[in-house]
Image (cartoon, helix red, strand yellow):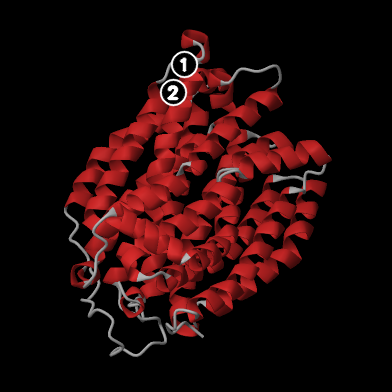
């Protein structure tokens, strides 16, 4: 495959319509709904573990202290992310060879098996060491699926959009995740109101996982009605073997690396303000569980509002202004905001800080996702996008709850999670500049 064929990428927002890119039909909102609904369920099944990490730790990872049990549970939460790069490259290669539609169905099936495994595994007290082993296996299956889900959905949405609406349509990948956050928090609020703390710890935490399993057949039906994207059908050169995909991705390691750095801020901020909030609110700020879950619900709604706005804005002014300005704002404001919160912890202060971080996440992610799709060569678009995203999530995002918990325990400073967020912002800021340089080496127009 020649270099010109390799870089027959999606036309960027500033590229002329007659640039040689595939002619895209008018986007169909039904297709957006069907593909986003599956992404909603994938994210729900994946993050629900983090919401009940304390109870899962007591059930499967009994230890000498509450901190040790929680850390084992959070490390298992993070283990799922270590499997995501494997899913990105293996399943991403499958999607780039077999098509976007078929791959999205496969990922949903794997997530279903992983979630059901965690939901029905007996406790450590009942079956001993087999219990945590089964939970880890279930988490690994979830990670394998999630490793390519975001990439598959983002690429699908990008390929059914027009160049001038790509940011807006890609934003629904992340927006559907925010509905999952809201749905998870609503279930948690209802559950904590119906059962006692003892019942929630004993068996109540299994209910949200089982709910996710019950929804899967409906989403699977919706996804089976998806059509293949016109961009994929018209692509002249498809990788015939998985080894071809691996080779092409390896030859573009600079783009994958810079893409990974781009994703670091979005994945770290997302898991900080969603999966970690219930634990932070309860363990560090000593707020009641319902208050922490309510804040998480509000964050999900806030994210849902900002993402389409940011995606649409990026279609008008370009992706790079947003992905440059937001990390700078995070570097300047993250620690002062967290220090103010821990100095006087309360529901209103936690809500205010989390909503600010939500705005930062929304405006950054709304521009970053379409930018990442646009810089990936089409022959390995799903594998390249998914690998960059999953590597960032594996190294930074997935372990955010565990790292933040460790930082607080180690330093005694409850505002220390802000340092982790600032580190992520700095990495992504470097990635913004490296991505432009890496892409320019392929002689493909990039956004101003």
- The 10 Å Cα crowd at callout 1, few under 14, some 14 to 19, many 20 or more, is some
Q: Quadrant of residue 64?
A: top right
Residue behind mark 2 = 134
Q: Residue at x 70, y 58 (%)?
A: 423
Q: Is residue 99 left or right of residue 304?
A: left
Q: Is 411 drawn above or below residue 433 in the view shown?
A: above
Q: Position of residue 300 (x, y in %)?
A: 50, 53
Residue placed under numbered mark 1 in the picture:
130
Left or right of 91 in this view: 427: right
Callout 2: SS = helix
Q: Residue at x 50, y 81 (%)?
A: 440
Residue 130: % across, % down: 46, 16
Distance, label 1 to label 2, CA atoms, is: 6 Å
Q: Are marks 1 and 2 in contact (CB under 8 Å)?
A: yes
- Tell me residue 283's x, y (percent): 70, 34
Q: Residues within 10 Å of mark 2 (few under 14, many from 20)?
A: some
Task: Point out residue 196 in the picture as x, y percentages from the top left corner.
Answer: 54, 21
């Amino acid at each position: 495959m020649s270099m010109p064929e390799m870089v027959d990428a999606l036309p960027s927002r500033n590229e002329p319509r007659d640039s040689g890119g595939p002619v895209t039909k008018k986007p169909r909102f039904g297709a957006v709904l069907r593909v986003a609904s599956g992404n909603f369920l994938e994210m729900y099944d994946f993050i629900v573990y983090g919401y009940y990490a304390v109870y899962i730790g007591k059930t499967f990872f009994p230890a000498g202290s509450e901190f040790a049990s929680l850390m084992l549970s959070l490390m298992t939460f993070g283990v799922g992310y270590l499997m995501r790069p494997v899913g990105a490259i293996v399943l991403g290669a499958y999607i780039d060879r077999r098509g976007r539609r078929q791959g999205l169905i496969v990922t949903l099936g794997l997530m279903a098996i992983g979630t059901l495994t965690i939901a029905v595994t007996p406790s450590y007290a009942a079956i001993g060491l087999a219990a945590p082993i089964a939970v880890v296996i279930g988490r690994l299956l979830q990670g394998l699926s999630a490793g390519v889900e975001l990439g598959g959905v983002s690429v699908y949405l990008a390929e059914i959009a027009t160049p001038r609406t790509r940011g807006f349509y890609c934003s629904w990948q992340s927006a559907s995740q925010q509905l999952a956050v809201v749905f998870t928090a609503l279930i948690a609020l209802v559950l904590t109101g119906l059962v006692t703390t003892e019942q929630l710890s004993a068996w109540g935490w299994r209910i949200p996982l089982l709910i996710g399993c019950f929804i899967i057949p409906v989403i699977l039906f919706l996804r089976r009605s998806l059509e293949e994207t016109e961009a994929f059908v018209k692509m002249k050169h498809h990788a015939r073997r998985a080894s071809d995909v691996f080779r092409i991705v390896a030859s573009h390691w600079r783009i994958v690396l810079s893409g990974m750095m781009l994703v670091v801020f979005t994945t770290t901020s997302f898991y900080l303000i969603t999966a970690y909030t219930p634990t932070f609110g309860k363990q560090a700020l000593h707020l009641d569980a319902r208050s922490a879950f309510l804040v998480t619900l509000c964050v999900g709604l806030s994210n849902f509002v900002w993402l389409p706005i940011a995606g649409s804005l990026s279609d008008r002014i370009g992706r790079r202004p947003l992905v440059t300005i937001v990390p700078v704002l995070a570097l300047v404001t993250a620690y002062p905001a967290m220090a103010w919160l821990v100095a006087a912890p309360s529901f209103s202060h936690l809500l205010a800080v989390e909503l600010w971080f939500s705005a930062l996440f929304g405006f950054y992610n709304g521009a970053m996702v379409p930018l990442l799709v646009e810089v990936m060569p089409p022959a390995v678009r799903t594998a390249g996008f998914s690998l960059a995203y999953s590597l960032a999530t594996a190294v930074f995002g997935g372990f955010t709850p565990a790292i933040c918990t460790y930082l607080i325990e180690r330093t005694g400073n409850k505002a220390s999670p802000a340092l982790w967020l600032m580190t992520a912002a700095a990495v992504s800021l470097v990635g913004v500049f490296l991505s432009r340089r890496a892409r320019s080496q392929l002689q493909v127009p990039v956004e101003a």
